[in-house]
Amino acid sequence: MYWTKTLIPTLREPPAEAEILSHKLLLRAGLIRKVAGGVYTFLPLGLRALHKVEQIIREEMDRAGAIEVLMPAIQPPEIWQQSGRYETARDVLFKVKDSGNREWVLSPTAEEVITGTAAAEINSYRQLPKNFYQISVKFRDEIRPRFGLMRAREFIMKDAYSFDVSDEAATASYQKMYDAYARIFERCGLKAFPVEADTGVIGGKFSHEFMVPAETGENEVVFCEGCSYAANIEKATSGIPKTATREVGAAIEKFATPGVVTIEALNKEPYKVPANRQIKTLIYIADSKPVMVLVRGDDQLNETKFMAKTGAVAARPATVEEIVPLLGAHPGSLGAVAATLKSQDISVFADERLRGANDMTTGANEDGFHFRNVSMERDIKVTQWLDLRTVTAGEPCAKCGKPLKIRRAIEVGHVFKLGTKYSEKFNAEYLDESGARKLSVMGCYGIGVTRTLQAVIEQGNDKDGIIWPLSVAPYRVCITPLNVDPNSEAMKLAEKIYAELTARGVDVILDDRDERPGVKFKDADLVGFPIRLAIGEKSLAKGEVEIKPRGGALQSVKADTVVEAVTKLVSKS
RNA sequence: CGGAGCGUAGCUCAGCUUGGUAGAGCACCAGCUUUGGGAGCUGGCUGUCGCAGGUUCAAAUCCUGUCGCUCCGACCA
C-alpha cells in the first residue's frame, strides 16, 4: 500500500476526548474515529490491526476444534424471555422496534440462539462434542462507555459455545479453550494471565478471566507470588484468620454512644473499641427484600460475593427511608442482636470471619446506643455464614501463606463452564448410547476483540507512539524514501524493495508523501510499524539502506541485501 | 442514576469575570525558499460560538431549559 492511497489521519495533539494513553494513541495514529459515545469507526489502519487479531483467534479456535458460525445481531425477544435474561440482563440489553412495532434485541452474546440451534440440530451423542464460535458485532447498553474501545456500546467479540455429553467432557472442552486463549493472547504479544472469576449474570459453575496487567484496567486482581493463586477481587479469598475468640464475657450490655455513627468514631476516646471488635451491620435490598449483612468492622463487604453466594439477582444498599421503619434506628446505630429486631423474618448473612466471635460491639437499633459483650453465637440469629469480605493486599494466601498482592488489569477474555443452565431452558437434549434423553453440558467463552486490540496498545508504547508486535501490526514494514520524485534514486529503490517484499508476502507500506523527513519519521513512530526502512541520499551514496526496528537500534545494510534482511526480521513471529 | 467539569474553525485552545465588528497556533489551499526527526516567509480558505428560549438597543459572554462529551462513583455477561 502507498501511504497517499489510503487514509491515515495522524494527529499531532491528543484529542480532548481521550483520557488514557491507548485511547489517545488509537486516535492520534489514525486507527479509529468516534462517531458517538462508545461508538467508533475503524479507519483502514485500525481495521487491518483488528483483522490480524481476528485471524489469530480464528486459527487458534480452529486448531482447538471449534467451528465458525455467524449468528444474527438482531434477535427475537422471545428467546431472551425463555432464558430469563430478558429480565436479568435488562439493563444492558439494547432493544429496537421495527416498522411494525415489533421489538428486537440487539445481541450482547448468543447463548440463546446457539442453544436453540443445538437443540434443533444435535440429536445424538455421536454428534458431540461440538464447539461453535463466531466473531461479530455485539451490543451492550453500557451505563457509562469509556476509554475508547475498552468499554464500548458496540464492539467486536469472539464468542464460543461448547456442547458435551457429560460434565467431564465439558471440563475437557473448557480446558481446550483455556489453553487456546493462552496461546491467542501470547501470539498477540500480550502478557495475559488467567484468574479465577465470578460467573455473574451469565451463570454457570466456574470461570476464569484472562487479564492484562495495566494501571488503567477496570478490574482488580489478587495474586500470590509464592504459588499460582490469582483471582478477581470479586472472587478472591485469603487465609486471614478468624476473629480471636475471647472468654465468654458477661451478658450483653447496652451503653450510650451519643453522636457515634461510624466505626472510626467508636474506635476513639472514650469508647476505644478497635474496629476488629466491632460488627458492621449493612442493610441491603436483595431482589426486593431487605436483608442484614454482617462483616467485621475493619472489613469491606464484597457485593459480588454477596450476590453470588445468596443467589440474589439484584441487590443494592437500602436507603435511610427504608432502614428507619425496619429497624427503628438510623445507619450507624444498627445491629443484628436478635432481641432488638422488630421482625425475626429478616435474613441475616454473616461473614465467616465473625464465626465464633464474642466480646464484640454493635449497634443497638436505637440511635445513640451500642451493645458490648455481644456473642455472635449467643446473641445473633445468623441465617447463613458466608465468605463476604473483600480481600486486601498483604493478607496471607490461602494456599501457601505468602502475602497476597493486588494489581489492576484489563479483562480481555472470559471462559465459563456453564453446566446445563441453558440446555434446560431450550431443551438441548441428545440421545445417549442406551437411547436415553440427556441434556448437553455447555461451556461459553468470550474474547473482547476490540478491547484486546486496545490492550496491545496499552501495553506496547513509548513517548513516540505505538510499538506493535509483528503479529498485530497493521503493516510490518514502512518504507520511507526521503525523496519521492518518481525519477529519484531513492524513490526508484523504494519501489523496487516494495515490490520485492510484497511479492514475498510481507505487509508493507510505502510512505510516498512529499513531506519533510521529520514528519515522515514522526508518523512512522506514532503509528508504530515494527520495521522502518529509510532511503535517503546519505545512505544511498554508500549503496546502503537503513533498517530501523521500532524501539530498536538502527543498522545499515547494502541495498541488494535489504529484502533478505527484512524478510528475516519480520518472519520471526 | 448521583457528583464534577467541558461544548467557540478539521485538531488543540484563548475570548466569557466586567455584554459592543469571531480570535491564535496547528492542519488545509497557492507561491517562493527549504529538505535525515513534526521548516520559514507571503497570501488565502475555514465558524448556525452544541441546541432552544429568555433578558437587553445589543448575547460566544448574563439567565432558564435541553442535548452531547469527559472524568469520579454506582453498574459491568
Image (spheres, coloured by chain):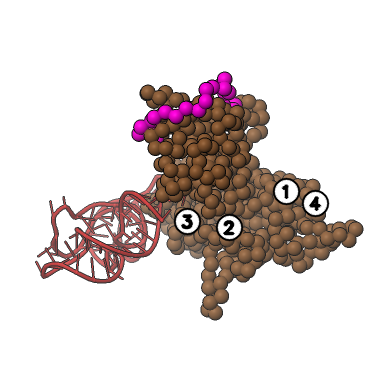
Chain colours: A brown, B red
Q: Residue furthest top?
A: A247
User: Which label sits on residue A88?
Assistant: 2
Q: Which residue is mark 1?
A: A174
Same chain for the residues under marks 1 and 3 in the image: yes
Amino acid at pointer 2: Thr
Q: Read off the chain for label 2.
A: A
Indicate which label's residue lies in the foreground, 2 or 3: 2
Nearer to us in this view, A218 or A268: A268
Question: Which badge, 4 or 3, comes first in the chain's sequence?
Answer: 3
Q: Amino acid at mark 1?
A: Tyr
Q: What whole-number distance in Å separates the C-alpha atoms at marks 2 and 4?
A: 27 Å
- Which of marks 3 and 2 precedes in the sequence? 2
- The answer to whether residue A379 of the structure is visible from this angle is yes
Q: Secondary structure at mark 4?
A: loop
> What numbered label is drawn on residue A143?
3
Residue located 55% across and 60% down the image: A90
Most common SS among magenta residues = loop
**Numbered range of the magenta stretch:** A240-261
Element on which disc 1 rests? helix
Q: What is the three-letter code of the residue carrying label 4?
A: Ser
- Say if mark 4 contacts mark 3, CB within 8 Å: no
Q: Would you say A287 lies left or right of A322 here? A: right
Q: Secondary structure at mark 2?
A: helix
Q: Earlier in the sequence, mark 1 or mark 3?
A: 3
Question: Which corner quadrant of the image does residue A358 belong to?
Answer: top right
